[in-house]
Image (tube, rainbow, N blue to C red):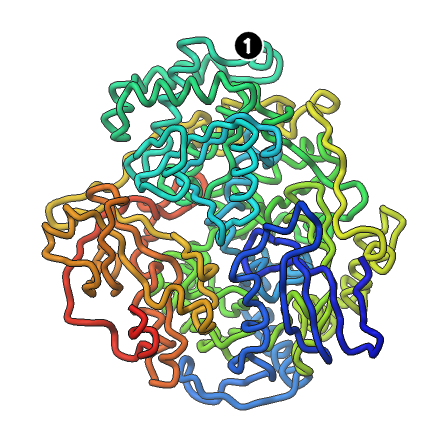
Amino acid sequence: MTAIFNSEGKVVIGDVVCTICDIGCQLKAESVDGVVTKVRPHDHPMLRKNVCYKGTAAPHIHNHADRLRVPLKRVGERGEDRWEEISYEQAMDEIAERLQAVVDQYGPEAFAASTSGWNTQTTHGCDRRFMNALGSPNWISGVSLCAGNTAAVNKLTYGWFPMPDFGNTKCIVLFGHNPRKHSWTPIYNSINGARANGAKVIVIDPRVSDQAETADLHLRITSGTDAVLCFGWLNVIITEELYDKDFVENWTVGFEELKERVSEFPLDRVEEITGIPRDLIVESARMYATAESAVIPWTPITDMQLNSTSAIRLHSILRALTGNLDVIGGEMLGGFNPDYIPESKLQLHELLSDEQKGKQLGSDLHPAYTYRAQEMLKEATKRAHGYEYADIVMGCYMANPSAVFRAMESGDPYPVKAFFTLGNNTLLSYPNQHRIHRALMNQDLIVAHEIFMTPTAMLADYVLPGDVFTERNHVADSWSWSTRLTLSQKVANPPAEGSSTYQFWYDLAHRMGFGEYFPWDTLEEVLDHRLSPSGMSFEEFEKVAHMRAQEPEYRSYEKAGFGTPSGKVELYSSVLEELGFDPLPYYREAPQPSADYPYRVFTGVREDSFFQTGQRQIKVLRKRTPVPRFFIHPEDAERDGLSDGDWAVLETQTGQVQAMVSVQDSMKSGHLRVPHGWWYPEMREEGSELSGAFISSDAVLCPDEPEDLDYEQGIPHFKGFPGRLRRIDGPPVGIDPEMLDLL
């Protein structure tokens, strides 16, 4: 609804979509004299519980004393953290000149960018629009490791990334996913609502997580063996004929081939590999397959394994075989909202020539979410969904991050010499942090667009201040995942020298000679354009609703088929076969623990107080989680001579990090949990290298050599790689004493 002003015009109350994390909760925000003062739950009864303490802390984030407010230009050596203030116009002039010099010398493919949908991002499709107009295929994002890669693999199987119908389902399967009151809050509330309506919950997790404590069944799986459990479930479902025979016969291809592959996984083998008792495998498979309806929601756990592609495909196959695809209480295929131009169209993929698409880094070895694979779905996507490109959750048509950093470091297969990072703390966001550091140090130009001085920004040549969600108008479209459109209104003012990401790309494009692709002078004009199919402007949209969505259309595939080459669910993938990969899911054993490295380390785990690498400087949040912690089982603590509260070093074949030890019965013996994204903003004043970026960051630990990556997508193995732990005398030097006093 229209933002409300008080009688004096000084207080503003509006609908906002929080972008502190990836969920995008709609909240209410209040400002006084152009400064946000409060973020609170929404008034709508369906939205009142959808708020976490990160969302309510938004004023502390947006008004923080350390927030970037003016453009900065590096004056010392790269990484020295020495700057001079310059105007926005000077910064953009120099950035355009230096980027053009890189393009002239090396070609447009020598430019790469890493962006995210959080914090500073506005109209995400304009990132790709700029790069496609320039001629670079080398865009990457953290969604390559989280949801985006799942979207790309789901497209290979049935042409879309489905969304669970929590409101009507009778069974929920959580593969390592642990939504809580202050993390994935709407999902947590949806699960509770489903439980109240009689839904059963199955949790597959080596830990006794919050969700596991209340689950109907808890399967304490060995980390990284999710694909094998899925094979076990399929064994039960096929053997006992619990699958939807009509759907399999009429709407799938490759069932007989799949059946043969499943036979390679008898339940005794599944039990041995997963560590789950045979009887529990059978019971859980039956509970899922015989439920009136069931969902397997997306999970970041399956995204991040050596067998990611196979595990994700197996989730897709389970949904299809059990008749839970595009039905009430199952997984909804959705599609594009006909009243809104999607980001996929805004990106202008057609501007990028086939020659440049062929240069996309990683497409030779790991093509599954690159142009090479996804272009094979163009015709099918248009037939089923109306557009040739479906960049769902930003996860399709992107370069492989490990390949990009390798090229930045070594020049192989060609040099990459200019790198932009927008709302993405790149150094800590991908595996093998030391390689990323070397890659960044080898650049001719680095530009960061951020709200805080992150370790990555410290390596930049130019740092530009961005805006935040209370400081811009926006229409959130759920990352093109569903048809829901959610209103977000500007209630506060950004820094005078700050810019939205749209403004940044607009200004850069006009300086570099292709401004015709950015004809809209303001972000509101972009929103007017995207809403044009509805016949409404943004101003009109904000007057009529805080949220709009299309009515679900069940079994939509009956009209135009699935968005696959065959028009059916491809249990046997024609695209993977054409690319030279196994067309069926499989299991590949990961490196195992040993006497020297006895732990199965799993990382990428968020803490409720923070999202990804953000918010460590926000005191009201940091006090909840003052320092990073390794979680281990009491048996492992006793073996290694460790006690709760000790500090320790975790070593892997790739690197080592420090954290405090937390001994917990909830952990599975032999497993070690590492939190994600730790650095120490307070160490900047102490002169610590890049604010302690290498001390506790899980990205230091994770390998990214070809043998360590998922074949089809190049996804690193974050779930169960070997590590060892040893005690040290105390915490790292430079941690805020106030935080240590809280322990």
Q: Horizontally, is 121 left or right of 255 in the view?
A: right
Q: Is residue 410 visible?
A: no
Residue at 66% across, 53% down: 352
Mark 1 highlights which residue?
Answer: 245
Q: Secondary structure at mark 1?
A: helix
Residue 300 lies in quadrant = top left
- Judging depth in this view, the residue of 372 and 48 nearest the camera is 48
Counting other residues with Cα less than 10 Å from the Cα at mark 1, is it few (<14), some (14-19), or many (20 or more)? few
Say above or below: 270 vs 124.
above
Residue at 25% across, 30% down: 275
Q: Is residue 491 visible?
A: yes
> Residue 674: image x %, image y %?
31, 55
> Residue 654: image x %, image y %?
26, 57
> Residue 688: image x %, image y %?
33, 80
> Residue 187: image x %, image y %?
54, 43
Q: Horizontally, is 64 left or right of 588 in the view?
A: right
Say above or below: 79 vs 583.
below
Residue at 41% across, 46% down: 715
Quadrant in the picture for the C terminus? bottom left
Amino acid carrying mark 1 in the image = Lys
Residue at 51% across, 39% down: 298
- Judging depth in this view, the residue of 193 and 667 nearest the camera is 193
Residue 258 lies in quadrant = top left
Quadrant in the picture for the N terminus? bottom right
Circle count: 1
